[in-house]
Amino acid sequence: MRRADRLIKITHFLRQRRQAITAQQVAETFGICKRTVYRDIQCLMDAGVPIKGEAGVGYSIDKQYYLPPITFDSDELEAIGLGINMVRQWTDSQFADKADSALEKIKAVLPARLQGELKQIITYAVPTRPKVPWTVNFSELREHIRVHHKIRIVYVDQNRQQSTRTLRPLALFFFNPVWLLVSWCEKRQDFRNFRLDRIQKLTLVDEVFEDDADKNLAAYLRQLGVCNDELSQ
């Protein structure tokens, strides 16, 4: 990997972490020695990247820092195009508009030699089963998850039994062709998954929940034996 590419990746790596990262963790992630990490971090700091280092703790970066626009290779553009196509196929029109907006921003910063690559995408997501309809507002639900707003749902399970649940919504998972809402259920005092198409009614509870360590998405993923970083990478 070229050093310039590695410096960009290290910057992204630091921005994606909530806690400070040690030089050893950076070294293991990028397959380099700690001495190289020290040099790379110093190079970034000299270039004005707001990285802070504390002995025994590690490195952290100001989350308000953004890299200037960068270019993509043809495979990266192919992956972006596929992802946008999947958003169009399997979410709602509001989220699809956001995906299209993101694509337009990418086009705006692409050099002329790569503009044609987006017109030659050869990888597509085509529905093999009908989309399972739901009545809840998909984009509003994503916002409730983002701001940690409690919700109340009327839900019908596979046995057609109806119940009312107050939830801490944590994430949306897609299992073609079904979307699942992962939540902490206050009725069961445990994590539960709810199919969007079985939610009969969804209302907002006037309460914001804290990111409790035993009730958040990271705790849910630990139960599954999955690391949070594995999903975000």
Image (spheres, rainbow, N blue to C red):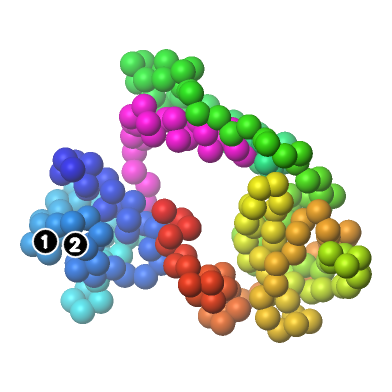
Tell me whether circle 1 and circle 2 mark residues in contact (CB < 8 Å): yes
**Residue 187 horizontal/vertical position (percent):** 79, 81
Work out whether 206 lies above or below 33.
below
Q: Is residue 177 magenta?
A: no
Residue 86 among those drawn in magenta? yes
Q: CA distance from mark 1 to mark 2?
A: 5 Å
Quarter-wise, where is residue 129 in the image? top right
Amino acid bearing label 1 = Cys
In the displayed structure image, the side of residue 227 where residue 198 appears, left or right? right
Instruction: Give me the disc on residue 33.
Output: 1
Viewed as shown, does residue 136 lie left or right of 142? right
- The residue labelled by disc 2 is 27
Q: Amino acid at mark 2?
A: Ala
* Residue 112 place in picture, x, y as percent: 36, 15
The correct choice, above or below, for 168 with respect to 82 in the image is below
Quadrant containing the N terminus in the rendered view: top left
Question: Which residues make up the magenta segment?
Answer: 64-87
Tell me what residue is drawn at x 37 percent, y 57 percent: 15
